[in-house]
Image (spheres, rainbow, N blue to C red):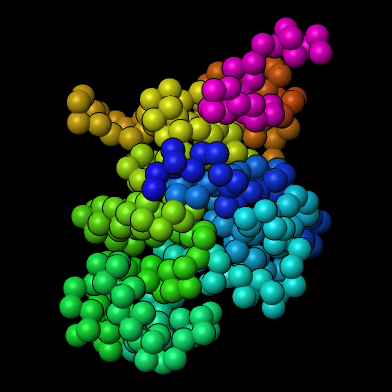
Amino acid sequence: MTVHDTIDQPPVLEVRGLRVGFKTRYGDLLALRGIDLTIAPGEILGVVGESGAGKSLTGMAVTGLLERPGYIEAGEILLEGTRIDDLPASRMRDIRGKRIGTVFQDPLTSLNPLLRISDQLIETIRTHLPLSKKQARARALELLTEVGISAPADRIDNYPHQFSGGMRQRVVIALALAADPVLLIADEPTTALDVSIQAQITSLLKRLCRDRGMAVMLVTHDMGVIAETADRVAVMYAGRVIEIGRVEEVVRRPRHPYTRGLMASIPTLNRAHGRLAQIDGAMPRLNAMPTGCAFNPRCSAVMGICRTSVPALTTTQDHGDACWLNRDLEATHAA
């Protein structure tokens, strides 16, 4: 199944106008400023941006893992058409793991070093599915086979330290798939791995998404991983989505100056490089957010309106951006 086969199906995940704040001694600070996202069955949506852009925070809000002093100020999160952001913690725990699987950056934070892999898989499976211990062990072996663990019958009773980093990440993916979730949140799943293992893990995610018809939110700072793995990409900056579209469109024809900067900073093999391109400046702090477009202090194409008004995310031909450069300013002022 591909994303093209599911384009007319209702989305698995809908995020509407999501705003997340943090209570501090200096007052409430807004970290997410109106996020709108959808992910279809069998689709991988890449979410990319610098550290502090709000990528992981979006994933935490979807999975119900926001902790105080963080809170959802406004917006809605719907899973298969049902709102989940206002559910009690006990109900959200049932959904997390059963209908939403999670894979994090460091597999050692997801695996108990004192328990065998079999114990952890069987416990997770039996928590969410009505299976006996024998049935759960058989399912655990199936999952390890599915994620590419060689000789799973010989490895299932090993401890996490007996696996390499890439194999541990495969085990974590097996744990995330234990209850057949409809949505997988993968937060920097390849960052701690070397390049060859990264390619294996991204290939695995693509295959699982295709074979299971599962929706995947792939959170990363690596545009190369997005280009190789995702169907669509959402570029985030300072708590907002500033560009979104199919990967080929965004990579080949980026509209927002920030996205252009990200693409220009990626080295290529078809031309000689001296110094790599960079985006001057840094992401603004939550308590020092500039007026207007948050990117305006770093933008080489900044205009007067950029310093006073925030451009809305508008979409044409399935490719959206939030930049005044791509607007008819005369029409905007006339309206």
On the picture, is 294 further left or further right than 178?
Answer: right
Q: Is residue 227 above or below residue 93?
A: above
Q: Residue at x 74, y 68 (%)?
A: 87
Spot occupied by residue 6 in the image (x, y as percentages of width and height): 49, 43
| Residue 261 visible in this rendered orientation of the protein | no
Q: Is residue 158 left or right of residue 137?
A: left
Instruction: Choose between 251 and 135: the one closer to the eye.
Output: 135
Q: Which residues are magenta?
A: 311-335
154 in relation to 99, above or below? below
Choose top left, top right, bottom left or bottom right for residue 311.
Answer: top right
> In the drawing, does residue 49 fall left or right of residue 147?
right
In this rendering, is residue 254 above or below 11? above
Relative to 230, say whether 159 is above or below: below
Residue 329: within the magenta?
A: yes
Foreground pick, 15 / 30: 15
Residue at 38% of width from left, 87% of height from top? Answer: 135
**Front residue of this view, candidates 112 and 307:** 112
The C terminus is located in which quarter? Answer: top right
Residue 166 position within the rendered picture, expressed as x and y whole percent measured from the top left = 27, 66
The reply to whether the magenta stretch includes residue 173 is no
Q: Residue at x 55, y 39 (%)?
A: 8
